[in-house]
Amino acid sequence: MSERTPSWGITPVPERLRTLGALDNGMLWGSLGLSLLVLVAGTVLVPALSLREALLAILVGGIFGNALLGLAALIGADARVPAMVLLRAPLGRAGSWLPTALNVLQNLGWTVFEVLVIAAAASALSQRVLGFHAPWAWKLAAAAAATALALVGPVGFVREWVRKFALWVVLASLAYLTWWSLRDAHLGALWSRPGKGGFPRFWEGVDLMVAMPVSWLPLVADYSRFSRGRAGAFWGAAVGYFVPNVWLYALGAILLLTRGLADAPSVLAAIATGGAGAALALLALGVDETKEPFANVYSAAVSLQNVLPAVPQRLLILAVGGIATAGAFAIDLVQYASFLLLLGSFFVPLFGVLLADWLLAGARYHEHDVFGAPAVRPAQIVAWLAGFVLYQWLSPVGPGWWTRLVEHTHPGLAATGGSLPSFTLSLVLALGFGAVARLRPAAAIE
């Protein structure tokens, strides 16, 4: 195994491989936040919300979501194990398998969506420059590049790709794209224009913003376990992802309003036809976008090792890459706001349970907390699922059949959103259940 590109399994990362400092973590998460998908997701907020409401929703959701991301990174650096293995502590060894399955599914889904976004951007550029689309070729190329980066691993990715090349090219491209978007934007007029109403309302917009950093909660420890310290992991992830997340969400909303576009995918076509500079910026973003499916392919493979620890990580990476490639040809790029929100409804309360258990353990996990956990901790699973149910009760999201099933229970409190209440409920329940469980052994001794 190379120390530059370690293929480390589920056991705690040794000190010699803990090489990522605060700057490395910041560059990693800043790079992951500089995504075409984030830009496109920002367009979902408008015109239902006014620009003022959209920007406020972006700020509120960004602070809450990225604070959770930073805490998850800190806990991962503390325990030095992958995220799904980390969940053995609050949920039990077998109890962690359910979130593992959900995480593998969401990673495959994100990989497919990212490959489709990359292919859409590349097709728009190739049509403009060369006169052909060839989306099938771009899908294959994007999936192959993501799989190759996943084989390199997170340390090699940061040191060889992000630090030396990708981050600086993308920052320059986005700086130009921001100037191009704002030069004729008439922000004063947009600022006073009211929203049209409908989906999303303000707190649903906050949930949509929260969903982006929250979608990384089940992955962040896969990378922060290679951190030198807890503080560097927290600030690197929280601040590193917050800045580009807020920037691109806002830019996406402004682009949709100023260019008079009909839907999210049309943003990419508008940039591709916006002149040579905009097209080059889109090209740079498209090439760099392969880092997003890289993270999902890598984390899907690492998550599977929680259930299949004996299977080589590189073999799992190749298998996940192959399945995602097939999915990119079977799934179309459609509305995905409900997909983002559905993921949030699972993983926001799940992190509340993890945070509660970590706090009860003295805000520090040891190896026996993870690998000495019982098979199942039913009370903590109940705390997690209670948060999920509350989220869906307050803000039903997901496929049409699911929302039709649960919408009749909706209490009419859409102004509250689902993220903060579900997180709080699971956190409080898990703290209560965990405190009672810790009191019982003491009472038995007395």
Image: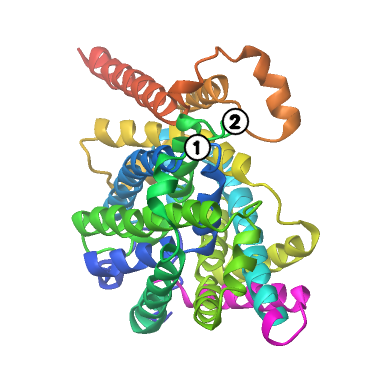
The single residue placed furthest to the bottom in the displayed view is 130
**Mark 2 vs mark 1, CA separation in Å:** 8 Å
Question: The residue under label 2 is which amino acid type?
Answer: Gly
Judged from the image, the secondary structure of the residue bearing numbered disc 1 is loop
**32 or 417, which is in the foreground?**
417
Q: Is 58 above or below relative to 315?
A: above
Residue pictured at 26% horizontal, 53% vertical: 234
User: Is 147 in the magenta?
Assistant: yes
In this picture, residue 82 sits left or right of residue 278: left
Q: Residues within 10 Å of mark 1 (few under 14, many from 20)?
A: many
**134 or 352, which is in the foreground?**
134
Residue 425 locus on image (x, y percent): 40, 21
Judged from the image, the secondary structure of the residue bearing numbered disc 2 is loop
**286 or 354, which is in the foreground?**
286
Residue pictured at 28% horizontal, 63% vertical: 227
Residue 178 locus on image (x, y percent): 41, 66
Residue 60 locus on image (x, y percent): 34, 38
Q: Which residue is mark 1?
A: 49
Query: What's the magenta region?
Result: 128-154
| Earlier residue among tags 2 and 1 | 1
The mark tally for this picture is: 2
Please say whether residue 376 is visible from this viewpoint: no
Please say whether residue 23 is visible from this viewpoint: yes
Residue pictured at 60% horizontal, 49% vertical: 106
The circle on residue 198 is 2
Give the quadrant of the C terminus.
top left
